[in-house]
Amino acid sequence: MSEDRSIANPKSPSSIFDWGFVTDVGKLRKMNQDFLAVSDSLFIVTDGMGGHRGGEAASEIATKKIFEIQRYSTVQSFRDQVIKANTAVRSEGEANSEREGMGTTFCGIALLTPNEGNPKQLALANIGDSRIYLLSQGSFSQITTDHSLVEEMKREGKITEHEAELHPHRNIITRALGIGIEANVDCWEVPIHKDDRFLLCTDGLSNEVSSVEIRNILETTQNPQNAAELLVDLANSNGGNDNITVVVVDVNEGDVYPEASSVCSVLLPTQIESSISLSPDDSENKPNKDGEWEATPENIRKLLITVLVMVLVIGLFIGRYARDNYFVTFEQVGDTPIENSQVLLYQGRTNSILWFDPTIEERRPILGRDLDESTIEELKQKPQFETLEEAIQYLDALQEEISVKQNNPD
């Protein structure tokens, strides 16, 4: 793998972006396993993992594979190329035993260029804990969600935001490119707005520099290259425990925000096709920062499946309860008197439960006329039994009693 850990295409006069970037090995690492790529239409940051040379290779392979295509017309086309990057990293790991199990995080921004008209949308994507931040209209926020153990614990309420920032296992990620056949990558669209500033970075920055410090530099440093350099310098000053990669992207052309607009309204995806996966069944929606459920086709499908599963489970439970019983009584056919009614063994409850009716398990050659008054009254009450064996024993005893009476009429 090359020593140069970046690819930078020259800016063209027609570019709607201005940008600055730095990738640095940090103070403690001997090797830089980060990689970045920038152009007029595509910005990528990756952070490799997987032992000696493995992480270095994974991040470079993934970045170069995605960067092979400079222009994307849809989120789907961006998605397809990320899938190819996942396959490329995995294939290299399988072919080289020294790189087995290698993988890489990824975050990226692609300018969506339609066949006709001017670009109106950006495609954003991430997997792992490399992040994308947005400074817009005085608001600053992390617009990606980390795929990490600590983030899951925070989302489940097990730890606080402050505890997450200091957690010793904050470097453990739950998703990455190349570590499996399937690659779950969050991917969505946002409009292009003039004067927005994006920051793409690896955890070498976010673990060393607080969001307050990041925001302060982005707000007070106009030149994007100077801002990138200041952020990396601050990360090294705060410890520099990991490789540090930063890309600052300024949007110089695009729609202007209306009065009293907010960044939250801008970030609502125009179409949630928000997971990138080798398996359609593995898709999941771009996390909603407000925790609100959205009526997207995917969410509706998941809701219907969940409801169906719940109905089936409840139905099975009710069905088991309704059938887990036996009782004995007279067969009631029209106006047939009890003396001519046959004694039957039923499976089920004495009363129907929903659509579960009791069913006849066994008929016995016993009529009401064969029984004394006390036994008739007992059978009218529908004596119940927990098992079939107990019910059969009851009928056997009843039939034996009748036989004894018939053989000894006195």
Image: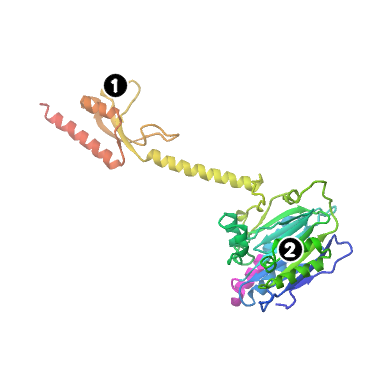
Mark 2 and mark 1 lie on one chain; the one further toward the N terminus is: 2
Magenta part, dominant SS: helix
Amino acid type shown at disc 2: Ile
Q: Which residue is mark 2?
A: 214
Q: Nearer the viewer, residue 292 or 48?
A: 292
Start and end of the magenta stretch?
86-101
Furthest residue to the right? Answer: 13
Q: Is residue 206 left or right of residue 309?
A: right
Residue 120, position in %: x, y?
81, 53
Q: Residue at x 40, y 34 (%)?
A: 357
Residue 380, position in %: x, y?
29, 27
Amino acid type shown at disc 1: Pro
| Mark 1 surroundings within 10 Å by alpha-carbon count, few (fewer than 14), some (14 through 19), many (20 or more) | few
Q: Nearer the viewer, mark 2 or mark 1?
A: 2
Report, in whole angstroms, how far the alpha carbon at label 2 lies from the one at label 1: 90 Å
Q: Residue at x 70, y 66 (%)?
A: 209
| Mark 2 surroundings within 10 Å by alpha-carbon count, few (fewer than 14), some (14 through 19), many (20 or more) | many
